[in-house]
Amino acid sequence: MSRALETAGAWLLGILWALPLAYAVWTAFHPAEYSTRFTPGAPLTLENFAKAWAAAPFARYFVNTTLLVAMILAAQLVLCTLAAYAFARFAFAGRAAAFLLVLVQLMIMPDVLIVENYRTMSRLGLLDTLAGIGLPYMASAFGVFLLRQTFKTVPKELDEAARVEGAGPLETLWRVYVPLARPVYIAYGLVSVSYHWNNFLWPLIVTNSVQSRPLTVGLQVFSSVDQGVDWSIITAATLMTSGPLLVAFLLFQRQFVQSFMRAGIR
Amino acid sequence: MNHQNDPAAGRSTPAAGAAATERWRVHVQGWLMLLPAAVLLVVFTHFPVGATIYHSFFSNPRPGRAAVWVGLDNYRAMVEDPVFWQVLGNNLWFAAGTIPLSIALALLMAVWVNGRLPGRSLLRLAFFTPTVLPMIAVANIWLFFYTPGYGLLEQLTGLIGLPSHNWLGSRQTALGCLVVVTVWKEAGFFMIFYLAALQSLSPQLAEAAALMGAGRWYFFRRVTFPLLMPTTLFVLVNAVINSFRLVDHIVVMTKGGPDNATALLLYYIYDVGFKFWDQAYAAALTLVLLVILAAVALGQFLLLDRRVHYQ
C-alpha cells in the first residue's frame, strides 16, 4: 500500500516536472489559436518555427554561440591541462599559495564581477566581441581542480618511463596524462558546453549587436522587443535555441548524467 | 632548459650541479605551464576584486568629470538606500525559499530514482531535463505559464473556481513564483549528486537493517541520511552560491518588479551599473556580494575541511 502511494507520489512529481516543457512543446507545434486550448487532435504545424526563424537573425546567433562555446572550451582545455599538470607533478616554489589563489575563482566566479570586467573589456577594446564574452571564463578554476585531481592518480612510474625514453614534460603530458584522463575531459567538456551555451547575464552586458550576440541574448531581445509577437512563436524560438543541447542530452542521456556526476564529485 | 648546456652546471661538482639545475628546471617549467591560466585568472578574477574595492571609494566618473575620492560616501548612500535593504531582504527570502526546498526535493528524487519504481529512467529524465536547458529559455516558458488570463496556471486555478490572479504582477506572489522556477531548475541537478552518493552506499547496510526489522523511514533517518552528509554539505554550498548568482530569470520574468519585490542583489548591481550607469555605487554593492561569497567560502572551509581533502 505504501509502495503504491510512493509510486504515485513519484509519478505525480515527475509529471509536474515535465509539465512546463510539455506545455511549451504543445504551444510551439500547434497554431496560435490552440496555444491555450488543449483539444486532442488539434492540427500540428511547424509554422511557428518558420516564423520565429524569419523574424530574427537566429542563424547568426547560432553561429555566434557555436563559435563562442568552441572557443571557450578549446582555451579551457589547453590552459587547464597545463596548469593542472604543473600543480599535480611539479613541486615549484609557491605551488600551495598559487593553488589557493586559483581556488578563489570557485567562489568568486566571473558572473559576479560584471562591473569591473566590463571596464577591463572596454579598456581592451573587446566590448561587443566574442572574445570579450569568453575571456573571463577561459582560465577555469573548476577545470584546473578537476584535472589536477585526475593527474594525481596517474602512477608516477608511467611518467618516469616516458621520461626515460627521452620525452620532455609536454610530450609526457600529451602521451601519458591526457589519454588517461579522457573520461574527465568528456565530463568537463559537456559541463562547459552546457554552461556557456546557457550563459546569459555577462553576454547581455558585453554585447550590443547582432554580430556578437549569442542565442540566449538573441532570444531575450526577440521576445522582449516584439510585444506583438504571439506566444506560439516565442515558445518555438525558445525551444529552437535550447534544441541542439536538448537533443544532444536526450541522445546521450547516460553520458550527460555521468559527466555531471563526475564533475560534481570532488 | 637543457641542463647539459647550462654553464652553471659545469662549475661545481657534476652531481650536485645537476641536482641544482634539476630543481631550477622544476620551478621554471612549473611556472611556465601555470602562466597562461594564471595571467587570465589575475586579470579577470583577482584584479577585479581589488578594483571593486578601490573604485567603491571614488565618485562615479562622468563625461568631462573624472572620478574623485569620496571615502565612504558610496557606503553611506548604500546604508541610506531603502532599495538596497529591500534587495538584500529579497535575496535572503529567495535563499531561504530555494535552498531547503531544492535540497529536500533533490534527495526525495534521488531516493525514488535509485529505488525499484516502475519507469524510473523516465522519471530521472523528467527530473534532470530542466538542468540542461538555458535559464533564459526556461524563464520564457514559465512566463507564459504564469500569464494572467490565459496562462496554464490561471486555467488550472480557474477550473477549481479560484479568482484570477496576476502571479508575477503582485508583490505578494512574484518572488514566490521565481522561487518555484529556480527550484524546478535546480532540484534535478542536485539529485544527480545524491544519486551518485546513494549508489556508492553498501547494499548490505539495508539488508542488515531489514533483518533487524528496522523500518524504511527509520533506516533512512538513522543510516542513509547521516551517510549522505558530505553530499548534503556540498549541495548546500552550491545552492547558497546559486541563490546569489542566478538572476537570468529575473531579467526575463519581472525585471525586479513590481516595486523591486523580486530584485536580488546581483540583479540590483546590474541595474545600478548598466542601466543607471552608476558604476561607483555598483562597485560598493559588488563588495557586499563578495563579502557574502567569502563568508560562504569560509563556512565551507570550516564545515567541509574535515571531510573533503584537496590534497
Image (tube, coloured by chain):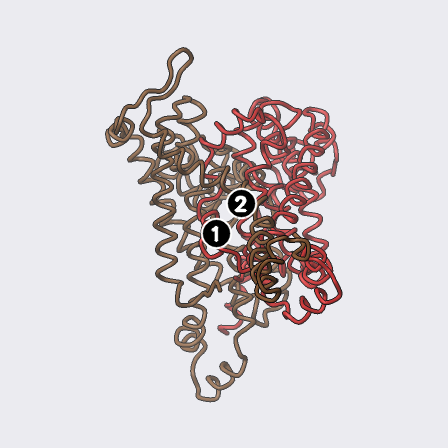
Distance (Cα) linking label 1 and label 2: 9 Å
Around disc 2, counting alpha carbons within 10 Å, would you say few (fewer than 14), some (14 to 19), or many (20 or more)?
A: many
Chain ID of residue with mark 2: B
Horizontal side of residue B104 vs A53, given as left or right: left
Name the disc covering residue B74, or none. Answer: none
Around disc 1, counting alpha carbons within 10 Å, would you say few (fewer than 14), some (14 to 19), or many (20 or more)?
A: some
Of all chains in the rendering, the one displayed in red is: A
**Whether residue B168 is visible:** yes
- The quarter holding residue B67 reads top left
**Whether residue A261 is visible:** no
- Local SS, label 1: helix
> Which residue is depicted at the point 28% across and 35% down?
B85
Q: Position of residue B283 (x, y in %)?
A: 37, 31
Q: Which residue is mark 1?
A: A98
Which amino acid, mark 1? Answer: Ala
Q: Is residue A39 above or below residue A221?
A: below
Of all chains in the rendering, the one displayed in brown is: B
Q: Is residue B75 above or below residue A18?
A: above
Q: Which residue is mark 2?
A: B38
> Which residue is depicted at the point 72% across and 25% down?
A54
Q: Residue furthest front?
A: B11
Judging depth in this view, the residue of B41 and B102 nearest the camera is B41
CB within 8 Å, label 1 to label 2: yes
Chain ID of residue with mark 1: A
Q: Are marks 1 and 2 on the same chain?
A: no
Q: Position of residue A168 (x, y in %)?
A: 70, 57
- The quarter holding residue A153 reads bottom right
Q: Position of residue B225 (x, y in %)?
A: 42, 70
Horizontal side of residue A129 vs B109, given as left or right: right
Q: Position of residue B213 (x, y in %)?
A: 44, 86
Q: Is residue A201 above or below residue B203?
A: above
- Local SS, label 2: helix
